[in-house]
């Protein structure tokens, strides 16, 4: 019995630009990096169970003024045990995490294109089609969030495409 191919899904990943920016992703070898250090169980579950190779993600700079979508990345490696959880010298070390039963998951992201100019949080709030978007909900702090296909399309329509 043939299996139906899974439809591409869309995401938003948050990073503080002073910790890791979209420019850092662009400067990484082959424009690719391990997306690690996520220490929230709900976000971990999304990385482990939902995020798949070929999915696309908005790269969002948080804790900056203005907070904004600054780029687009592609998932190029699916979830696997986050090595930072096992490294006692890493700030994301988790002494309770074991390699045979990892608590934390990483994926690999590759830069696809910069969003120029960035799409600010204020701009996103002004689009009625995005009213239900996870990012725009009160108290939403997840560093990895699903984005509905209609939301992705509405945001993509806000800026012309430019290759990274």
Image: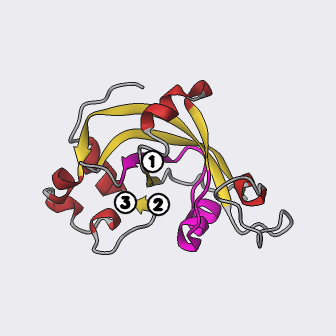
Q: Nearer the viewer, mark 3 or mark 1?
A: 1
Indicate the position of residue 146 as horizontal and vertical percent values.
44, 61
Highlighted range, magenta? 36-62
Mark 3 or mark 1: which comes first in sequence? 1
Indicate the position of residue 32 as horizontal and vertical percent values.
59, 34
**Image quadrant of residue 151?**
bottom left
**Mark 3: which secondary structure?**
loop
Q: Nearer the viewer, residue 116 or 85?
A: 85
Q: Determine contact: label 3, label 1, CB under 8 Å.
A: no
Please give the residue where the numbered disc 2 appears in the rendered image: 143
**Mark 2: which secondary structure?**
loop
Indicate the position of residue 77 as horizontal and vertical percent values.
66, 44
Q: Nearer the viewer, mark 3 or mark 2?
A: 2
**Image quadrant of residue 160?**
top left
Marker disc for residue 148: 3
Mark 1 or mark 2: which comes first in sequence? 1
Indicate the position of residue 43 as horizontal and vertical percent values.
54, 66
Whole-number angstrom distance, CA of label 3 to CA of label 1:
11 Å
Marker disc for residue 57: 1
């Amino acid at each position: 019995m043939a299996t139906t191919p899974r439809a591409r899904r869309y995401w938003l990943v948050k990073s503080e630009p002073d910790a890791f920016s979209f420019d850092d992703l662009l400067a990484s070898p082959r424009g690719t990096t391990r997306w690690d250090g996520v220490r929230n169980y709900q976000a971990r579950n999304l990385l482990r169970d939902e995020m798949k190779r070929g999915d696309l993600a908005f790269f969002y700079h948080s804790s900056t003024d203005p907070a904004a979508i600054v780029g687009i990345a592609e998932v190029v490696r699916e979830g696997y045990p986050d090595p930072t959880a096992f490294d006692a010298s890493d700030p994301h070390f988790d002494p309770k995490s074991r390699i045979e039963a990892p608590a934390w998951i990483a994926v690999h992201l590759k830069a696809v294109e910069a969003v120029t100019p960035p799409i600010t949080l204020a701009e996103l709030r002004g689009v009625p089609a995005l009213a239900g978007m996870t990012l725009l909900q009160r108290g939403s702090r997840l560093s990895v969030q699903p984005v509905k296909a209609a939301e992705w399309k509405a945001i993509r329509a806000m800026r012309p495409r430019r290759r990274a």
